[in-house]
Image (cartoon, rainbow, N blue to C red):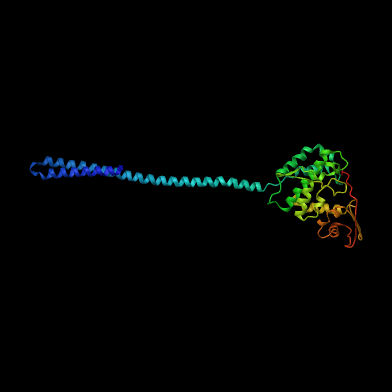
Amino acid sequence: MKIALQFLLLSIIYGCNSSSQEKKINSKENVDTLAVNQIIDEQKQDQKIIDTAITDTFSIKKDTLEGKIVDSIQDDITSTSEKKEIIVSKKPKEKKDKKVQKIRPNHTIWDQLTKKYVSSTGKVNYKGFKSNISKIDQYLAHLQKVYPKKGWTKNEKLAYWFNLYNAATIRLVANTYPVKSIKDINSGKPWDKKFIKSGSKVYSLNQIENTIVRPNYNEPRLHVAFNCAAVSCPKLLKGAFFPSKLNYQLEKLSKNWINDTSKNKIQSDKVVISKIFEWYAVDFKKGVIPFINTYATTKAKESAKIQYLEYNWNLND
């Protein structure tokens, strides 16, 4: 609007001046030299007005055009900056998610406690565990928060469940110690007591062994990993299970258990073995004898007669 008004003003000025100048020049009889000079001066002044108006007009156009260009550039910069801020704001979240996925349980507390209170012969110092029951609780609380996820390996999951089961068993016994047998707890059904927390769920010892591990992992050596706190049970591991050396630990425990004559007596034609082989025969898919021969110093024939030892439920202390 401002530019249009300026052009209209210029047209009026220029038209008026032109008409006036023609009248003056055509009246030759009234014009002398002075008058002519005056007309020329007026023309110069008028031309200056016109030039100034044109210059102002183009300056306005130029400023307007430059302003639009600057605004456009600033908008582009702002848009780019906002995009960068969005990308930057997303990156920490992605990193955080990846970090969360990599979290694994720390078994150090359980490793230290078992090395301190479990003897090389498998005797368990429940009195010592009871004096450190707060540390067991700390470890169990940690396992509740850091529980198996989809991305965990088989060994990571098994190590978790083995350690959780054993720590919970020791916690159960230590809490009521001294007792003669684990079967003196919870009206003779200690394995049905639901008190073990993993994530938002609460399990019993039976559920961990018989509904989680046994059906899902096809691992017959789990019977040397789970400790039932009884004399006839395979020895409790002196230390914690770790994913990186789980196979080695299970192999060592299996060999010690099979060749422990207080728990298994192996001969070529006859084997007198733990009741565990009778109770959980289905877990030994290749057969009991082949499993025994994998670890036994003396190999039994496939046709060897099998008998089962009476299970001693006295506490392994």
Q: Is residue 241 visible?
A: no
Q: Quadrant of the C terminus?
A: top right
User: Which residue is at 16% across, 44% downward?
Assistant: 19
- Total labels drawn: 0
State whether residue 175 is above or below residue 255. Answer: above
Residue occupying image coordinates x 15% and y 40%: 38
Q: Position of residue 104 (x, y in %)?
A: 70, 47
Say which of 187 and 99 sits in front.
187
For residue 261, side relative to residue 241 (left or right)? right
Residue 230, given in percent of the width and then of the height, sits at 86, 46
Query: Looking at the image, can residue 33 be seen?
Result: yes
The quarter in which the N terminus is drawn is top left
Q: Position of residue 92 (x, y in %)?
A: 59, 45
Q: Quadrant of residue 75?
A: top left
Question: Residue 268: x and y, percent?
Answer: 91, 60
Q: Residue lying farthest left?
A: 29
